[in-house]
Amino acid sequence: MCEFVCSRNALSNHSRKPFLTMKRLATCLVSTLVCLPKLAQAQAPAQPEVVEMTDTRTASTASPGTAAAATSASPAVTNPASTGGAAAASPAASDAWEFGYHGYFRAPMRVGMGERDVRAPGQGKTTYHSPLVPDDQYLSWQHTRHSQRSWAEAFFSVGNKLVQGTLALQGFQFADAAWNEPKANFGISQGYLTLTPDIGYENVRLIAKAGSFWNSYGKAGRYDAGAYDTYLFGRTHAMGGTLRGELDTNGLTLWGEWGAGAKEPDPSAYNRSQFTLLHHVHGGVKLGNTAEIGLHYLNSFANSEFRPGSMTTDVSVNSPDGSLSVYGVEGRVDGGMYGYGYLGFSHIQAKDAITVGPAIEVLHAFGGGEYSLGVADNYLNAPGCAARMQCSGGNGSVNSLLAQYEFSLMNLLQGLRGGGTFWGEGQDLKLALYAMYNSIDSRDPAQDGVSRFKYGTDLEASALPWLAAGVRFDSLSPNSKVPEQSFKILSPRVTFRSQWVTREEVSLQYSGYFYDQRSCATAADPSATPADGIYTVGDERCVQPPSAPVLPAGFGATTTNQDAGTRASGTALPDASVVTLTATMWW
């Protein structure tokens, strides 16, 4: 009896492949504890069970895939991401080794338009340049998708139904249309193994990954990182591994995931972050493809020795160890013809986090204190905190709400007529609504108690197989204490493609920027601007550049915040108009 109680036949009455239930699993565990002494005295294991475990695999049984085709991208130090999420080919459906190739690129021509107040002979009034806008730095809270920068990636994979190896080539800035910037070429940025063993039960799945790869948590979109292209809980950037298990029972899927990793810091003397370790756990329940609730916890910490040669003033040999944690809950509902909705809450807790490297990328912030890209400078430090000697030191917290709703008119009409799901093969009107709210607690008194809010909508009409027209609107309020920093963006566009459902598009877009206060200049100080890199009182009373401007010529880029001998942007005023022509393809 004891030899039989946990056998696969005892756990299931299925003749084809066992189906593990919670009741049978509990019975097995209890019975194993009761029978353990007797089993330990057995002379040999029951051979029929071993044979049965190994004989259940057949060539027609495919292990579960790990990710969709590559429609994602990684942020560079100054580069926006594309549609987000891990990218890899699904494991093959047989024992044979197969090759896979997936990719994505976004190639935008971006032209900003300005005006000369004073003109020399032969100079026109209108100027054209690389856009100077407050929202094109991916690693900034002010980021939107109105003025996305270039990106390209290619994922190569080899594997079978049990194991797959993947290599990724990634980078931004097409050199032939700009210049050769070595930091824009990431080279072999990811390399990892995905294991999907057949453990013998049709309702149980196990997925393991090891190497250098992304895992992303808190994506608001139905298929991607949402309208703001960010992650409520985080996207991991580390060398390590994850283990995920899934169990189907009573119409539900229960899942859990654990992971750990390490992040090497950029060794630049101007970078504060140090060697960082990461661990994270997640769990949730899914109701088919209709609804899902997930719980998340991620923690990164730096306990490294001080590295000599640092040129930063806020990290020393006596700096305390730092940590950055994120936890929260999310829910998503696919209402079929009534649309898709997402709502999530996260809490970011930073403790001396300026030394914490970017093992976690969360809500437009890259780690704790990675240059000026982390949580410290994106959320916890107000402009001019160094001059006031009141910076947070990476101490504080951020509570955030993220919501998104997606709707298709044709999907609703088709559903009301009793038809199936509409997949885009015809005329349609699509609507997206989205918003994010953040509440900040910080040791910097100027930033403590600040709340942020941004919201927007995107409407697109597909009129012909090759033509669609749309418009996107966003309103951003970065600082509840200083409303003059707020701005709005309106972007009508026309999109061309080869057919209704395809893998490419070319879009032509105009973006109009409307600032509550475009300039900080006053009669007493006509040259005052937050974009010159030198803080003076009053510089916070107009639209702000990102905490880490896009170099070399973005809004806020100067000759003092980049490599010596590099030319900066020619004006400190942000643009009111930008024209973009973008070619995009994914495969």
Image (cartoon, rainbow, N blue to C red):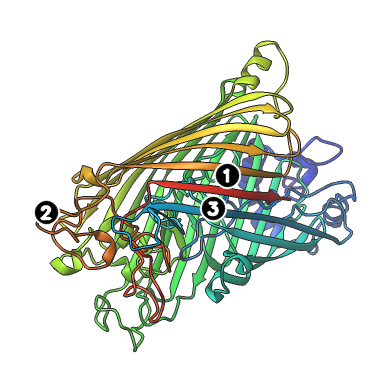
Left or right, 479 with respect to 110, comes to: left
Q: Residue 424: x percent and y percent?
A: 70, 29
Q: Quadrant of residue 116?
A: bottom left
Could you tell whether 568 is left or right of 8 in the image? left
Task: Identify the image quadrant of residue 384.
Answer: bottom left
Q: Amino acid at mark 2?
A: Ala
Q: Work out whether mark 2 precedes mark 1 in sequence or the reverse, and give the earlier one.
A: 1
Label 1: state its secondary structure.
Answer: loop
Residue drawn at (68%, 23%) of the image: 427
Judge from the rendering whether residue 31 lies leftward or rightward of residue 558; answer left or right: right
- Disc nearest the viewer among 1 and 3: 1
Whether residue 368 is situated above or below residue 543 in the rendered picture:
below
Between 137 and 303, the residue placed more toward the observer is: 137
For numbered disc 2, what is the local secondary structure? loop
- In the figure, 38 relative to 465: above or below? below
Q: Measured from the top left, where is residue 581 in percent x and y?
A: 58, 48
- In this view of the protein, can residue 381 be seen by the observer? no
> Which residue is at 27% across, 74% downward?
320
Say which residue appears at 42% left-offset and 54% top-offset. Answer: 364
Which residue position is annotated with label 1? 224
C-alpha gap between disc 1 and disc 3: 10 Å
Which residue is tagged 2? Answer: 523
Q: What is the distance, in whole Å, between disc 2 and disc 3 at their CAs?
A: 49 Å
User: Label 3's element?
Assistant: strand
Callouts 2 and 1 close, C-beta under 8 Å: no
Q: Residues within 10 Å of mark 1 (few under 14, many from 20)?
A: some
- Dot 1 amino acid type: Asp
Residue that mark 3 sits on? 216
CA–CA distance in space, label 2 to label 1 = 47 Å
Visible residue check, residue 585: yes
Disc 3: CA contacts within 10 A as few (<14), some (14-19) or many (>=20): many
State the image coordinates of residue 103 (x, y, percent, origin top left). Answer: 70, 56
